[in-house]
Image: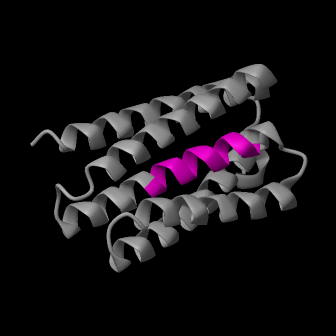
Amino acid sequence: MQLLLISITIINFSIGAWLYYVLRKSRFLFSDRFGYTASYFASSILGLVASLNFMLLFPNHFGVVGVLNILLGITIGFLYGSMFNAQSLIAGIYNGGISAIMGTMLGLVVKNPAICGLPGTIASEQEMIIFFALFSLCIQGISALLLQFSFKV
């Protein structure tokens, strides 16, 4: 199970790095408005997916992983936002941090549904972890393809 989570995390970061490379290479071809939207979108999705995967990998270290997820989300937002202008930088940092917090909370609820008052007997913990890990992979892939497709206009 750990091997599956590690491989999904590596694939998600590879998709994020590829998307960063594509955006960086073609950043002069689109307007500030599209740059802002791309920064907002990419940092939100990658921050959410990365923090969810790290929370599923290290569930027993909530404090350390939570802080590292927020720093990782802010760093991701800074990287994507710094390609364009100041408004996209601010949007990237903000949305990267917020999505990292959301991914951390989602990871906690996946591990212990009783936190939100949800019944814990719907599916086993292992099934939920695998489902959300694969779901994060699908979300990351679909969002990267949508952003890539938006260049083809």
In the image, 118: left or right of 36?
right
**Which secondary structure dominates the residues rendered in magenta?**
helix
Question: Which residue is more in the foreground, 90 or 114?
Answer: 90
**Magenta stretch: includes residue 44:** yes
The answer to which image quadrant residue 90 occupies is bottom left
Q: Residue at 21%, 59% (x, y): give it.
A: 28
Which residue lies at the image location 76% right of the left edge and 36% below the top edge?
Answer: 120
Q: Nearer the viewer, residue 25 or 44?
A: 25
What residue sits 70% from the left and 57% below the top? Answer: 69
Residue 113 appearing in the image: no
Q: Position of residue 132 (x, y in %)?
A: 61, 32
Horizontal side, residue 44 vs residue 151: left or right: right
Marker count (numbered): 0
Residue 119, position in %: x, y? 72, 39
- Determine whether, in the image, residue 103 is placed left or right of residue 125: left
Give x and y (percent) for residue 80: 44, 59
Report the magenta residues as a range.
43-55
* Residue nearer the viewer, 4 or 151: 151
Q: Does residue 108 lie above or below 31 as drawn?
A: above
| Rendered position, 99 above or below 88 | above
The residue nearer to you, when weighing 74 against 113, is 74
Residue 54 among those drawn in magenta: yes
Rendered residue at 67%/64% (across/down): 70
